[in-house]
C-alpha cells in the first residue's frame, strides 16, 4: 500500500493529479506538474452519458497550462479543448497528424451543436423572461484551438521542452490514436510515464492493431472493458448478411446508431465486402445511407491518412486502385431535408446515422420514425454508456422518450458483438504483459467502478503490480512514490426531473377509468339484490378472485 502524506501538503517537483474519467468512462483529463510549477494536461475530454461523480476543478488557471498531450480525437478525450482555449490556454497541443485532422472536423461539429443548443434554449428563456444562454464554446474557439496543434509522428522521440520528451505509439483504437510515453528529466532524476489512451481491439478493419510500449515507471491505464471479455464475438460479415436478409424479408430497414468517426468507416468496409462478394443475392442493390455530414468528412480524412496508420488488408485494396470504404449503392446525406426524406423511404435499406449512443445527432429522428415498427431492426455496433438512450434501449426498455414523445419499442434490437474499438479485459492484460519493463505502479482510470476495480485487482494478482483506482482530485508524488492526496468520491447530485404533463395527464385518465369501472361494478352488485343465490355467489367469486390477485 502506498503511503499517503498527512498534514500540510509538501512541495513536489513531479506530481500527477487525476481530474477526469476516474471511476467513469468519459471526460478524460489528467494534470502533470513538473520542473517547479510547470503544467501539462493529458487529454481534455467532455463527459458524456451518466455522470456519477463530481470531477475536481483544474487547480491552476488554463493560462498556466503550457502543453496538452492528446491521445486521440474522440470527444470524450478532446471535446473540452476549445473551452480551455476560451478560458485562456495559449500553449501547445501535441498529437498525431491524423488526430489533429479529425479534431478539426469533430470539434467544429461539437461547436455547432453547442451553438444550436444555446440558441434554442435562449429562445425558450426569452419567452419567459429569463436570460440568454451562452454556448459552451463556438466555432471561433475551435479555429483558435486548431492553430495550437503540433503534429507528431509515431515511434519517434520528440523533445518538446526542457526535461520533457514524448513518444506516440499506435494504440489501435481509432485512426491516429496513441499511447503516449512521457520522459521526464529533472535535477538528474528521470521518470517515465505511459498514458495508455484507449487501447484498441485486435483485428479491427482499416487500422493497425495496438502496438506495445517498452516500459514505464508509472502506467495510467484505461479500463473500459476491465471487468469483461468480448464474449460471443462473431464474424461481422455473416452476422450483417443474416441481419439484413431477415429484416429485408419482412419489409423493414436496418437502423444503425454509429459514431461518425471510426465505427462508421468500419461499417462501410464491411458493407463493401458484402457487395463485392455478392453475399446478399436477393437484395444485390440494397442502398446504404450514411446520414452524417461529420462521418462524410471523417471518411475523407481516412482516405488521406498516412500509410503507417493502415493495416495490410486496407493497404492491399488501395494498391489495387480500389477504395476500401466505397461501393455502388453508398449514398451520403448532407442537409437536414435529405435526412428527413429517408424516413419516407419504403425500400429495404440500411441507414447509418450519427449518434453512437443515441444521445444526439440524426439517429434520434430515425429511431422516432422506426423503433415502433416490428419490421425494422436497430443494430448497435458499439459501447453504450450507462444513462444513455442507447443503453436504455439495449437493456430492453419497452417504451422510450425520444424528442419529447413516448414511443413503444417494437423493432428488433441487436448488438454486433466483437466490433468494439476497445480492448477487453484479456486484451488490456496482454498489452501490459508485452511491456518489457513493468511499471512500479499502475493507476487505473477510464472505466466504471466495477471495471476499474476488477482490472486493478487482476494487475496485482497476475503481475504483482501495485494498482490503484483514484477518484477525481487525487494527487501522487512521482519522485517519492507517495500519495499527496487520496480524494474521496463525491457523488453528483441528480437534478429532479421536471414533471411530464403528458405522463401526468395519461396517468390521471387511467385513474379516472379505474374509478369509473369500480363504480360500475358497485352498481352491478347493488342490482343483484333480487337475483338467484347461485348468480350472486358466482359474481362474488369473480370479484374475490380479482381482489386476491
Image (spheres, rainbow, N blue to C red):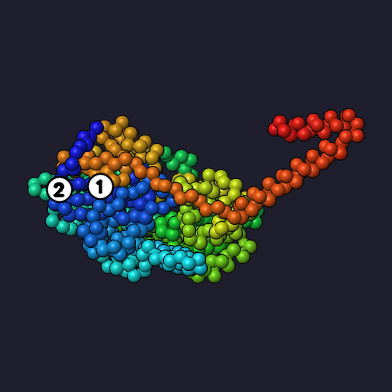
Q: In this orientation, does residue 4 appear?
A: yes
From this view, report whether residue 166 is shown above or below residue 224.
below
Q: Position of residue 505 (x, y in %)?
A: 64, 53
Please tell me in which quadrant of the rendered image residue 462 appears: top left
**Side of 273 relative to 435 (left or right):** right
Q: In this orientation, does residue 174 appear?
A: no
Q: Which residue extends farthest left?
A: 188
**Side of 131 relative to 181 (left or right):** right
Residue found 34% across the figure and 62% down from its top: 103
Please tell me in which quadrant of the rendered image residue 223 appears: top left
The residue under label 2 is: 13
Q: Where is residue 319 in the image (x, y as percent from the top left)?
A: 37, 62
**Side of 96 relative to 402 (left or right):** left
From this view, report whether residue 484 is shown above or below residue 495.
above
- Residue 402, numbered label: none
| Mark 2 element type | loop
Residue found 65% across the figure and 56% down from its top: 251
Indicate the quadrant containing the C terminus: top left, top right, bottom left or bottom right.
top right
State the residue in front, 354 or 53.
53
Residue found 49% across the figure and 55% down from its top: 358
From this view, report whether residue 89 is shown above or below residue 516.
below
Q: Where is residue 215 in the image (x, y as percent from the top left)?
A: 22, 43
Residue found 27% across the figure and 40% down from its top: 486
| Mark 1 element type | strand
As measured in the structure, the alpha-carbon distance from the residue carrying label 1 to the one carrying label 2 is: 13 Å
Indicate the quadrant containing the N terminus: top left, top right, bottom left or bottom right.
top left
Look at the numbered discs 1 and 2 and tell me whether their residues touch, using CB distance below 8 Å: no
The residue under label 1 is: 17
Amino acid at each position: 500500500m502506498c503511503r499517503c502524506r498527512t498534514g500540510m501538503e509538501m512541495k513536489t517537483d513531479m506530481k500527477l493529479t487525476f481530474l477526469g474519467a476516474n471511476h467513469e468512462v468519459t471526460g478524460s483529463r489528467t494534470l502533470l506538474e513538473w520542473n517547479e510549477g510547470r503544467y501539462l494536461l493529458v487529454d481534455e475530454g467532455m463527459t458524456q452519458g451518466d455522470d456519477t461523480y463530481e470531477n475536481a476543478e483544474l487547480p491552476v488557471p488554463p493560462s498556466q497550462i503550457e502543453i496538452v498531450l492528446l491521445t486521440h480525437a474522440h470527444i470524450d478525450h478532446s471535446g473540452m479543448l476549445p473551452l480551455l482555449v476560451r478560458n485562456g490556454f495559449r500553449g501547445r497541443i501535441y498529437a498525431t497528424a491524423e488526430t489533429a485532422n479529425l479534431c478539426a472536423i469533430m470539434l467544429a461539429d461539437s461547436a455547432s451543436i453547442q451553438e444550436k443548443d444555446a440558441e434554442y434554449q435562449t429562445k425558450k428563456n426569452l419567452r419567459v423572461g429569463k436570460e440568454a444562454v451562452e454556448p459552451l464554446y463556438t466555432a471561433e474557439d475551435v479555429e483558435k484551438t486548431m492553430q495550437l496543434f503540433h503534429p507528431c509522428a509515431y515511434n519517434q522521440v520528440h523533445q518538446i521542452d526542457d526535461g520533457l520528451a514524448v513518444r506516440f505509439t499506435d494504440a489501435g483504437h481509432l485512426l491516429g490514436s496513441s499511447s503516449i510515453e512521457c520522459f521526464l528529466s529533472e535535477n538528474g532524476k528521470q521518470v517515465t510515464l505511459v498514458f495508455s489512451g484507449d487501447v484498441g481491439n485486435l483485428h479491427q478493419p482499416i487500422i493497425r492493431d495496438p502496438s506495445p510500449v517498452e516500459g514505464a515507471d508509472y502506467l495510467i491505464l484505461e479500463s473500459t472493458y476491465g471487468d469483461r471479455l468480448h464474449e460471443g464475438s462473431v464474424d461481422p460479415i455473416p452476422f450483417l448478411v443474416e441481419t439484413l436478409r431477415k429484416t429485408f424479408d419482412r419489409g423493414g430497414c436496418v437502423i444503425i446508431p454509429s459514431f461518425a468517426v471510426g465505427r462508421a468507416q468500419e461499417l462501410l468496409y464491411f458493407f463493401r465486402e458484402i457487395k463485392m462478394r455478392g453475399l446478399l443475392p436477393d437484395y444485390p442493390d440494397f442502398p446504404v445511407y450514411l446520414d452524417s455530414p461529420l462521418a462524410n468528412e471523417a471518411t475523407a480524412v481516412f482516405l488521406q491518412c498516412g500509410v503507417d496508420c493502415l493495416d495490410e488488408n486496407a493497404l492491399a485494396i488501395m494498391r489495387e486502385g480500389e477504395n476500401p470504404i466505397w461501393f455502388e449503392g453508398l449514398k451520403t446525406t448532407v442537409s437536414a431535408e435529405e435526412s428527413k426524406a429517408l424516413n419516407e423511404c419504403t425500400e429495404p435499406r440500411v441507414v447509418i446515422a450519427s449518434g453512437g449512443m443515441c444521445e444526439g445527432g440524426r439517429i434520434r429522428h430515425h429511431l422516432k420514425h422506426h423503433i415502433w415498427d416490428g419490421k425494422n431492426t436497430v443494430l448497435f455496433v458499439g459501447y453504450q454508456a450507462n444513462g444513455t438512450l442507447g443503453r436504455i434501449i439495449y437493456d430492453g426498455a419497452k417504451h422510450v422518450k425520444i424528442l419529447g414523445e413516448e414511443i413503444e419499442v417494437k423493432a428488433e434490437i441487436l448488438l454486433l458483438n466483437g466490433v468494439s474499438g476497445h480492448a477487453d479485459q484479456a486484451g488490456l492484460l496482454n498489452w501490459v504483459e508485452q511491456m518489457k519493463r513493468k511499471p512500479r505502479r499502475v493507476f487505473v482510470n477510464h472505466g466504471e467502478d466495477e471495471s476499474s476495480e476488477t482490472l486493478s485487482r487482476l494487475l496485482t494478482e497476475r503481475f504483482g503490480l501495485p494498482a490503484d483506482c483514484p477518484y477525481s482530485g487525487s494527487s501522487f508524488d512521482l519522485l517519492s512514490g507517495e500519495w499527496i492526496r487520496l480524494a474521496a468520491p463525491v457523488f453528483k447530485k441528480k437534478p429532479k426531473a421536471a414533471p411530464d404533463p403528458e405522463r401526468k395527464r395519461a396517468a390521471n385518465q387511467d385513474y379516472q377509468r379505474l374509478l369509473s369501472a369500480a363504480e360500475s361494478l358497485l352498481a352491478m352488485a347493488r342490482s343483484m339484490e333480487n337475483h338467484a343465490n347461485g348468480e350472486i355467489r358466482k359474481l362474488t367469486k369473480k370479484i374475490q378472485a380479482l381482489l386476491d390477485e
